[in-house]
Every structure is written in C-alpha cells, then in structure tokens.
Amino acid sequence: MISQKSRLVTVTRAVLIVGWLAAIGVPPVILLRARTAWLEELGRPEVQEQWDAFRKDMQKQTGRDGTVQRKVPKSTEPPLRVWLRDYLWLAIAAWILFGTVLSFFTSLMVMGTVRQIASQPLLARDCDTQNVKE
C-alpha cells in the first residue's frame, strides 16, 4: 500500500508534468491554428496600404529636428505578416526551449519542497526539539 507521503510526491510529480505539457503544447497549437486566418487578414490590400502609408509618414518625419529620430522600416510588408510567415517555427522552438528550462528549475524547487515535507513534517521536528530542551 502506498503511503500518504509517497502519494503526495507522486501526485505533485504528475501535476508538474501535466502543467509542463499544457504550457509547452497549448500556446503553439493555438498559434498554428490562428496563423492561417491571420495571414489571410494581413494579406488584404487595405492592410498593405496602411503599412505603406505608415512607411511614407515615417519617411517624412526622418529629416525633422527633435528629440525623437524616426527610422523608416525596411520591410515592405507588415512585421506581423513577416513574423508569421518566416519566423514562426523559430518562435515556437524558443517557446519550447525556454518554457522547458523554466519548468525544469521550477519543478526542482517544488519537488525538493514536497519531498522535504513528505520525509519529515516540519512541525513534528520543531516539537521534538522543544521537548528535548525541556
């Protein structure tokens, strides 16, 4: 029969694994599902016209004196469209890498705390040391 303490460790481990899988898997799946609709939306001529108007406005503001120096964006397409088309897989790989590293170290701290609690309750240890002193 499994003791309460080892059950706590097992449940904590399972919760951490499920949480890691959800944190790593859900955002990329949502992003991939929305990607096609976003690319279609960003491919409309009105969006391109707005981007071109923005670039022209930035070009007009580059020669002005003032505290803020404007730069004309180099891309002829809206940045979100370029990102979704060209760099999405890089962003997903970075999400998985950094999410896994963060989850790993968080899990180490949580499991260390849970194992400490499961191995010997802190209150019982404090009570035993007080009884010995008296």
Image (tube, helix red, strand yellow):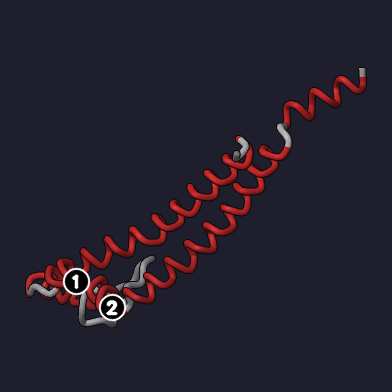
- Image point (7%, 75%), residue name: 45
Residue at horizontal 21 percent and vertical 82 percent from the top: 76
Q: Which secondary structure lies at badge 2?
A: loop
Q: Label 1: how many residues lie within 10 Å, few (<14), some (14-19) or many (20+)?
A: some
Q: Amino acid at mark 2?
A: Pro
> Which is more toward the observer, 118 or 38?
118
- Picture quarter containing residue 44? bottom left
Tags 2 and 1 touching, CB below 8 Å: yes
Of labels 2 and 1, earlier in sequence is 1
Q: In the rendering, at what x and y percent does residue 119 appear?
A: 71, 40
Question: How would you rate the neighbour count of disc 2 (Cα within 10 Å): few for under 14, some for 14-19, many for 20 or more?
Answer: some
Q: Amino acid at mark 1?
A: Phe
Nearest the eye: 75 or 63: 75
Left or right: residue 84 compared with residue 92: left
Report the quarter where the N terminus lies: top right
Residue of label 2: 73
Q: Is residue 54 left or right of residue 115?
A: left
Q: Marks 2 and 1, Cα distance to the nearest angstrom?
A: 9 Å
Residue at the outermost right position: 133
- Which image quadrant for residue 131? top right
**Extreme residue in the front direction:** 1
Residue sitting at x 19%, y 71%: 54
Q: Quadrant of residue 89?
A: bottom left
Q: Is residue 69 left or right of residue 12?
A: left
Horizontal and vertical percent position of residue 34? 21, 64
Horizontal and vertical percent for residue 98? 49, 65
Residue 77 versus residue 108 in the image, above or below: below
The residue at which mark 1 appears reads as: 54
At numbered mark 1, what does the secondary structure look like: helix, strand or loop?
A: helix
